[in-house]
Amino acid sequence: MTDSALETVLRRDRWIVSGAIGGVVALAWSYVLWLANDMDMGGMDMTGFRMIPAGIGIMLPANEPWRVIEFTYVFLMWVIMMVGMMAPSATPMILMYARVARQAMAQGKPFAATGWFAAGYLLAWSGFSLAATFLQWVIERMAMLDSRMTLANNLLGAFVLIAVGIYQWTPLKDACLVQCQSPLLFLMRHGGFRGHARGSLLLGLQHGGYCVGCCWLLMALLFIGGVMNVLWIALLALLVLLEKLTPVGRWIARAAGIACVGAGAWLLAFSLQ
């Protein structure tokens, strides 16, 4: 294949991969909007009840134990929400993988499909989603979560905000953010791309692990603004995108940290009055 023909194919692949990611993100956000609309309940008083994020108006008494089907629905909600929030920031890495894969194929070298790397990345966030589901269950059992999946305890909310703000300034946050900001640096430190499916899946899992390490505590802010508050979800997704894809991402992260500590201190003072 000539260089010009290869470049044409690479451009086509870039559009295909970008379109696929865009389609997946659009579907994820459509699902989140559907759930949020269902859980709105037209302003009805939901005191004493909790909504199950199924999109079909299921609700149960607040004091009734979770069922397997409810745990499944909540886990699915978290997984799809994480896809909608995190996939855009992973696009540069996935596009780089697709380009290298096409070049390897053009040279007759074995190379795992891009989907294996993307699957590993999403597997990392699925693990996070499972932990978030367990956390939501615990908070709800402690009667600290209202029907809209928002923390009902101002003192706990203040501590969450302060913890998020402090984490934004930690060396661990820095280390994970650097790996997410620079796909090339990540590859250099982890031996480059793999030519087989298992290795590609594990590499995607590693990259996803760094992204979880970078953003896991930020996701706790969903319990502050409301897990099904679409505007709040969008703002957090935008913050993640700015942190990872802009040259001043580190300073944006620190500025967000200061804002969280300030908001947490205010809420703490208010709750102690």
Image (cartoon, grey):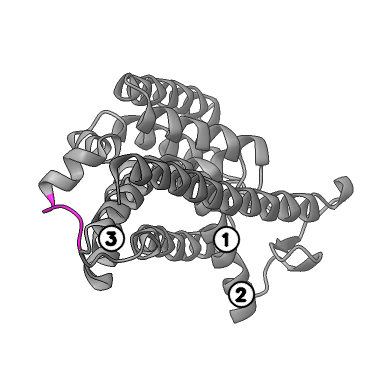
Q: For the point 36% across and 57% down, which residue is it?
A: 121
**Marks 3 and 2 close (CB-CB < 8 Å):** no
User: Mark 2 Cα within 10 Å, few/some/many (few <14, many 20+)?
Assistant: some
Q: Which residues are magenta?
A: 190-194
Residue 41 x %, y %: 84, 52
Q: Quadrant of residue 254?
A: top left
Q: CA distance from mark 1 to mark 2?
A: 10 Å
Dot 1 falls on a residue whose secondary structure is helix
Residue 97 x %, y %: 31, 51
Foreground residue among 223 and 145: 223
In the picture of the structure, the residue carrying the numbered disc 2 is 66
For residue 148, say whether it is visible: no
Dot 3 falls on a residue whose secondary structure is helix
61 displayed left or right of 272: right
Question: In this view, which residue lies farthest toward the bottom?
Answer: 68
- What type is the residue that disc 2 sits on? Trp
In the picture of the structure, the residue carrying the numbered disc 3 is 105
Q: Looking at the picture, does residue 53 appear above or below residue 97?
A: below
